Amino acid sequence: LLSTISSISKMILRLSTILAATGLGLLSPSILVGARQLQRSTTLDREKQKLDGEDLSSTISSNSRLLLHRRKKAQQKKELSRRKLQSSQCKSIIAIDSISQAMSDDGEENDEDFLCELVHGVTLPIQGTKEQISQMRALLHDGTLVSNESTLEVLQEVEMIDGMAVDDDDSGEQQPAFSSLMQGSVSLPPGDVNVINSSDGRKLNAGYKVQFEGKSPVLVVKITDKNGLTVEGNATYISDKVFGTSGDDINPAKGFKDCSFDKFELTNEYSVDIDDKLSAPGVLEVDINISFESSSQSAIRSATQQAVETKLGFDLPGPFQHVMFLTENCYGNNCGWAAYAYISGWLSLYKKDNYIK
């Protein structure tokens, strides 16, 4: 309607101009005044409609954002309601020691960190206050805390479904889902650290004992992540660098043997036949479906252990005294190490070519 009225007023004003130019006379003043007022009125109405439309669009946009914000808050509240902190006991406490990528000028050694071993071989960092971690280190040094054997109570986040915690193993205990276990950490309860030691040692690894003499079976695992990232060198090269299988005279196997006067030797000879699984003597290759670049060390260790156990058909450590995980690199924070290992345990992990340095 406004468009039609505006067109009529414009026609009247144009007709007046034409009549004046041709000498045919002018329209009456009242008609011209009315036409000009009508045009101004329609122009103002259009501007008002435009402003009203912008206000309406702004209101709709604002309401949409508010609705999305409320939905997001409701989803977050729902997710939080499905999770709770629950006290649980680690299957064992594993102390880990690392070798720095660059030695410090003052020769200061790295302090130990601690992992909580859970179901499926998952190991998560133990978080606590500075005083609690210092207390754990003191307990480790005086022998109260025995790595790979002692345990303690920790606080662990558990996923709830319909008011019940997810049951993730055959023990009947409430456990988080495996996928959520692979990320995150566990925390120490407030107060002093209370280490638990069983009278007969750790039952879970009753068949595993640290070996200091004789032949020590070692398995090297070359890991490839979902993006194809893997340590340089094929399995034959790695086997030669670790065991000297192709004539390399400078390797860990020879070094341990010479330095111990033939009392300790790394070997790729095992009590079980897995030759058809190996890519080269002592070297197993596995793929993991996660990324080195975006995954935590806990997730990488857990995914690799699962892949190895699936390929070999038995649980680690199995017949091996030691297992070496080789990764392409470490990404993110806390990557200043060249390698780290479980104290009194069977696992070590190396980044890049540090397994031969």
Image (cartoon, helix red, strand yellow):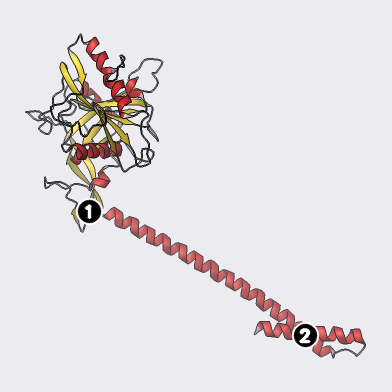
Q: How many marks?
A: 2
- 190 or 21: nearer the viewer: 21
The span from disc 1 to disc 2 (Cα, nearest Å) is: 74 Å
Residue 326 in the figure: left or right of residue 20? left
Quadrant of the image occupied by residue 69: bottom left
Mark 1 Cα shell of 10 Å, populated few (<14), some (14-19), many (≥20): many
Residue 21 in the figure: left or right of residue 175? right
- 13 or 277: nearer the viewer: 277
Asked if residue 152 can be seen in this view, the reply is: yes
Nearer the observer: mark 1 or 2; the answer is: 2
Q: Which residue is mark 2?
A: 11
Which badge, 1 or 2, is on the more N-terminal residue? 2
Q: Which residue is mark 1?
A: 160
Of the numbered discs in the image, which one, if any, rests on residue 235? Answer: none
Q: x%, y% of residue 50?
A: 62, 73
Mark 2 Cα shell of 10 Å, populated few (<14), some (14-19), many (≥20): few
- 170 or 211: nearer the viewer: 211
Residue at x-position 33% and y-position 21%: 356
Asked if residue 122 can be seen in this view, the reply is: no
Q: x%, y% of residue 38?
A: 73, 84
Q: Is residue 328 above or below residue 34?
A: above
Q: Could you tell me the amino acid type at mark 2?
A: Met
Q: Could you tell me the amino acid type at mark 1?
A: Met
Residue 61 in the figure: left or right of residue 311? right
Q: Is residue 24 above or below residue 119?
A: below
SS under mark 2: helix
Q: x%, y% of residue 155?
A: 22, 41
Quadrant of the image occupied by residue 316: top left
Residue ranking furthest to the right: 23
Q: x%, y% of residue 160?
A: 22, 53
Residue ranking furthest to the left: 200
